[in-house]
Amino acid sequence: MNLYTSLTLRYLKENKKRTIVTIVSIILSTALICGIGNIYESFMDYQIRQTIENDGDFHATFYDIKKSDLDYITKSAGLTKSGLSDNLGYAKINPEKDNLMQVKAYDKTTFDGYQIKLKEGNLPTNNKEIVLSENIASKINKKIGDTITLDIGKRVDENGEEISGWQSENETLKDIKSKSFKIVGIINKPGFEYESGILTAITYLDINNQPANDDFNVSIAVKKPKEVYTIASQISKNLGLKTGTTEENTEENSSMHYSNDTDEFYENLSFNEHLLRLQGASAYANINNGMTSIIALVTSLVIVCTIATVYNSFSISISERKKQFGILNSIGATKSQVMKLVFIEGILVSIIAIPIGLISGTVAIDLVFKTIQALFETSFIADMNLRVVYNPYIMIFSTVIVLITILISALLPAISAAKISPLEAIKNSGNYKLGKVKDSKLVRLLFNTEGVLAYKNLRRNKRKFRTTLFSLIISIVIFISFSGFMTLFLKANTVHMGQMNHDIYIYKNGSNEGSKIINELKDIKGINNIAIQNDYGIGLNVKEKDINQTYKDLIENYYTKEKVGNEYSYDFINSMVKMPGDIAINNLKLKDGSFDKETAIRENGVILVRESYYEEKGKKGEVILTNYKVGDTIDAYVSYYDEENDKEVKETIKLKVMAITDDLIPGAYSYNYMGIDFITYDEVGEKFNFESYGNSVYMSTDKQENTRNEIKEIANKEGYKIVDEIEEAKAMEQSIMAMQVFVYGFITVISLVSVTNIVNTISTNINLRKRELAIIKSIGVTPGGFNKMICLEGILYGILSLLYGLPIGIGMVVLMNSILGDIIQFGLVLPWSSIIICIIGIFVITFIASYIPMKKINKENIIENIRQESI
């Protein structure tokens, strides 16, 4: 061990408190950076696993390819593998029931590509063997080793047209052929087997035993996913398959498949675009780019916070050892040798902190995933079965970033240490401004003499003042930015997944007795809200001046526009009038206006739901399409078909906006898709000949068993069928709680980094000024005045840091909102509660950081502190 290392180690040991604070800060920062990377990798891993389970790990699939043309595909350059499959048709699982199975044939590569997993038995090895989905096995009286005869045919509707997809009521099978198979295995439910009543059976496809004129499906995977469109297009060209940029080709040719990425139609060719997006090779690259940008921004904030913390630690270390560096310079130490001392200190704390931070970040995320799966079993996050992906690149990246951060943090203090002259160190005057320090009239007015002293103490050493203020500002920016990021995350999830604001609903075909059952249900104490589904479609003639100009392009792409008189009007054809009943209306939270029933009936009053939902390629969100405000009268119309005159008739109605809300009534999962909803009373609807039905009633309850039993008793008595969605509602609640664990976990960790930084900076600065403060006490400042002065220093730091930190923090949230707006749009969302907590917290923390060293100084001897040689 050389002299520099031994000197540094001795200093670190003598200042254990500061060393520990620095190490803890680096550990937390490393854990955060590593944790963010681990979460991103884990979510990407889940999405890729889920996509492969549902859609296979192939990048594209060609359909109905002749056996003689297979070599055009399978022997193309750039492929990693190709798999063959065939849809043999459909068969009834049980003759007495309507359940269907789809019979497929896969070769070995396709079995692997679609992640077909055995529950028991073996996979088929010839076309006389078959495996059944576990859902089929539970519906038939067959076991492994038995022979099953299937009547396989095509699905057709009542008009004889061939159909696919979800099972319908009036469909039948035609062109039936019987075929017998030996059941050799039971497979787990494949990811592509949805809850549509159509289950899966798979036999083996041996291409060598197939007739030359048979058609097959060929799935391919390529070496470089971004090249799949070029490769597949070339193969299509070789096969003579068509491509087109308009839907015209699809009208006469149902074999055309649309690609979002190229905005083209391909004959007998489709792409696995979800997998391609995750691999950075699709039109939805904006999603990956947006998420990467936000993560990069958040990581940058953590890095800046780490720089501030470590820089403060080294800056304080230099101040404490100023005399030591001066003596070293006086006995011949070079500038590079002095700088080396500081860098060795940085390397030593890095060797200790970084490995602990990497382990902590990885283990912490693993524990969070396992905790969520244990505590929130029914949440969709638990269903995701997230696992920590141990990506070495994340570890290396985190280590390099933190090392660079520490070296940057140590650089300026090291340069400062190298410049210290022996005379300056002995005089102890380098850090202080000589001469008159500028006063502040506002501070004098608000805080009197003690405030002026506090203000001048801060201003006297500009470097320390700016360093401390910067540290506080960064802490504020970090807290608000992270809080804003998590608020955006929760809001984006709500937009993406929808809301579930009911947990039970009842329905009755042809019923118009809604008011009767509502009168019985409203007396049940456990019901929080009730809404009847009475929705009527209307159109709106929206004048150009009334549309939201921000979304003019979106509106013009979706709605027709015509000139009426001297101005243009847009035809909002898919708007809605909802009449959910008095209880649901009374429970709405109004953003503006009021909704009196008598006035509403008299003036055709409505509540405007100002938000609408929309989707486009790679993007979705909530938008405000119009500028309607309380008091506006809206030109609407109701359309109906006049059979006598064989034409469509539009009947004009007038609606007056009396209130505005952003709430959704029970039963509504999201806002109207590119339309506007209006909520009103039944009596208003009756004026437009809108009848009040009660065939579907949605309720939100306290989720107690006795409440549900009372609802079911009334529903059964009135002949209503019951759909109890308590489990779905609880799953949604648990999902939200699980996400909040992520949210508040991250905010807690980043708050610890920030608080550590603030307390360390302020309390150390006060401790380093013991001599100066002892002199102030010795010239007659009272104990109360001294305490006030120290506390005011903390308050002034808090005020100044908030003046800079709040605007910057809010600006960062706005920036993240803008980036996320390329993926999910929902307007500006600010974390107001976190901003309030930050304002209160910064004053509490700065007060505590000042109070603790102040109490310690008050107990120490003034003369001993004045005689203290170091700053």
Image (cartoon, rainbow, N blue to C red):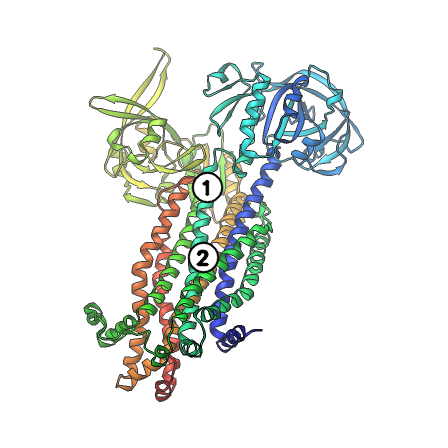
The total number of labels drawn is 2
Image location (x, y in percent) of residue 312:
41, 67
Q: Residue at x 38, y 31 (%)?
A: 674
Residue type (three-letter) at the residue carrying disc 2:
Ile
Image location (x, y in percent) of residue 851:
37, 75
Q: Is residue 415 visible?
A: yes
765 to 180, vertically: above or below? below
- Which of 171/235 is in front? 235
Q: Quadrant of residue 827?
A: top left
Give the residue at mark 2.
303
- Which of 24/870 is in front? 870
Residue type (three-letter) at the residue carrying disc 1:
Asn
Q: Residue furthest front?
A: 332
Which numbered tag is attached to residue 289?
1
Q: For the residue labelled by badge 2, is the local secondary structure a helix, a strand or a loop?
A: helix
State left or right for residue 511 relative to residue 541: right
Mark 2 / mark 1, whichever is N-terminal? 1
